[in-house]
Image: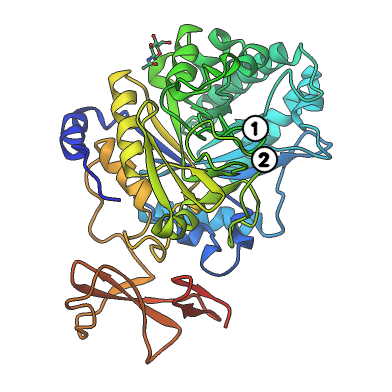
Amino acid sequence: WGLSLPSAGVGMQLSLKSSSTKLACHMTNWAQYRPGTGKFTPDNIDPFLCTHVIYALATINSFNQISPIEWNDEQLYGSLNSLKNVNPALKTLLSVGGTVNGVSPFIAMVAKPESRAAFINHAISFLHTHKFDGLNLDWEYPGHNGSPQEDKQKFTLLVTELIKAFEDDANDNRRTKLLLSANVAGIRQTIDRAYEVNNIAPHFDFINIMTYDFHGHWEAVTGHNSPLYGSSVDPVSQIHNNINSSVSYWVSLGAPSEKLLVGFPTYGRTYRLSTGATGLGAPANGPADAGPYTRTAGFWAYYEICDFINTATLGWISEQEVPYATYGSAWLGYDDQRSYSSKVQWLTANNLGGAHVWTMDMDDFSGSFCSAGAYPLINHLRMSLGFTPKPTTTPRPTTTRNPSTDFCRGRPDGLYENPADKTTFFQCFQGNTYLHHCQPGLIYWDSCKCCNWP
Ligand SMILES: *[C@@H]1O[C@H](CO)[C@@H](O)[C@H](O)[C@H]1NC(C)=O
C-alpha cells in the first residue's frame, strides 16, 4: 500500500500558515483497559505530535460539577499535563460529556441559570487545579436523545456564559484565558436540531466537527466511515453524509472557517457481507468480528487494520477518495496516508483551521503493528498540514536502533521474532534493525506480529 500523492509539495506550501493551523488529538481514558500492546495511557503520547491533546472523557455529577469517570483519572491528568514540561507549546483540554444511565448529564445542568453557574465556577477551578488549558464540550447532542428542543437555546446560553466567565477569570486573576472547544455533529439533520451555529461558533477557540461515523454496520449496505465526497450509490437521504457537504454546511450557517477542524478517524468501520458483492453499496447484515484489542464489533483501530490489510483485497473509492478492504465476508472502510493527504488538500483549499483526530490510541502509537514507525497516521497528518519537523530528541522509549546486529540485512521490511529473547522483537525498516521491547509480562508472537500474553 505505497503512497503516491505529492504530500511533500503540499507540506511546503502550507508551512507558511502552520502557526495558526491546529492539530487537536483526542485520547480516551478507556484505552488503558485494552490488552497487551493496545493498552494506552498518556505515557504513550509523543509530546511533539499534536498542538492540542483532548482528554476524553469526564462527566457532570448531580452537583453540576465536572467529575472524573475512571478510578485513576486524576493520576492520568497529571501524566498528560506533565508532557508540557517536555513541550511547553502543547495545550491540553478536558472533554466533558458522555451519558449517565443513557442520558446526557448536560440536560439537567443547562436547565437553570444557577446550575449553569455552578458548573462554570467549578469547571474553572477544576481545570486550573489539574493544569488543563481548556474545556471541550462533548454534548451529543442538544435537542436529541430525550433532550428537549429548547436545549439548543440553552446550549447557546452555556457557551456564552462560559466564555464570559473564562474572560473574567483571565482578567481578574491575571492568567491565560482558558480555551473553549466543542465536538459537534457532522450530519445535517443533527446540526439543525442541535445548534444555533452563528450564535455559538464565534465564541469557540476551535470546533471539532465529527466528520466520521457517516456510515456503519447499522445500515443494510456497505458505506464508508469518513468519505471526503458523496458517492453515486448514496441514497437520497444520505447525499450529505460526507466531509465536503458537512463542513460546507457549517460554513454556510455562519461558522468562521478558520475555527473549524475536520475530524480524521484513526479507525475504520466494518460490515459482514451477505452476498457475493464486495464493492461500495454491497448488501450487508451487521458488523464483522470485533478486533482483538478494541473488542467491539463494528470498528477496528488502525493498528488492527494493519494486520487485516496484509491479507485482504484492497480497493480505492475514487469518487470519495478513501480506501476499503475485503477478506472473506468482512468489509472495511478505513483511512490511510493517501486519504489523509486528500483530506488535507481539501481542508487547506477551503481555509479551514486544521484537523482533529479521533483518537491517538487507535493509531499505531507504539509502531509495533504497521512497520511504519510510531503514530504513522498522525505523523503523516502533521507533515501534510505543513508543520515543521519535530525535534530530533523526541523520546521514543520503546524503540531503539540496535546497530550491533545485522539481523535485517537483506530482509524485507516487517516484524520478526528474536529467538534469543521472546520479550523483544525485531523491526526491519530499509535494511536497518530496530529492537523493540514488549510491555512487561508480554512476549512477541509472530502469528499476530504483536506482543501478547504468554
Ligand atoms: C462540495 O460541496 C460544495 C458545497 O456544498 C458543492 O458545491 C460541491 O459540488 C461539492 N463537491 C463535490 C465533489 O461533491
Residue at image point 30% right, 45% down? 380
Mark 2 is on which residue type? Asn
Report crowding for label 2: few under 14, some 14 to 19, many 20 or more residues within 10 A (C-alpha).
some
Rendering coords of residue 221 (x, y %): 59, 32
Which residue in the rendered view is the most extreme toward the bottom? Answer: 420
- The label number, if any, that marks residue 285 in the structure image: 2
Rendering coords of residue 58 (x, y %): 67, 43
Q: Secondary structure at mark 2?
A: loop
Disc 1 from disc 2: Cα separation: 6 Å
In what quadrant of the picture does the C terminus appear? bottom right
Report crowding for label 1: few under 14, some 14 to 19, many 20 or more residues within 10 A (C-alpha).
some
- The label number, if any, that marks residue 57 in the structure image: none
In front here: 188 or 389?
188
In front here: 91 or 418?
418
Rendering coords of residue 345 (x, y %): 28, 28
Label 1 CB less than 8 angstroms from ligand 1: no
Relative to 385, does residue 110 appear above or below in the rendering?
A: above
In front here: 59 or 252?
252
> Quarter-wise, where is residue 73 in the image?
bottom right
> Ligand 1 shows up in which quadrant of the image?
top left
Colouring scheme applied when the structure was drawn: rainbow
Q: Contact, CB < 8 Å: mark 1 with mark 2?
A: yes
Label 2 CB less than 8 angstroms from ligand 1: no
Question: For this view, does 424 lie left or right of residue 410?
Answer: right
Which residue in the rendered view is the most extreme toward the front? Answer: 276
Where does label 1 land, which residue? Answer: 220
Rendering coords of residue 204 (x, y %): 51, 22
> Quarter-wise, where is residue 216 in the image?
top right
Residue at image point 61% right, 10% down? 196
In front here: 344 or 178?
344
Relative to 178, does residue 240 appear above or below in the rendering?
A: above
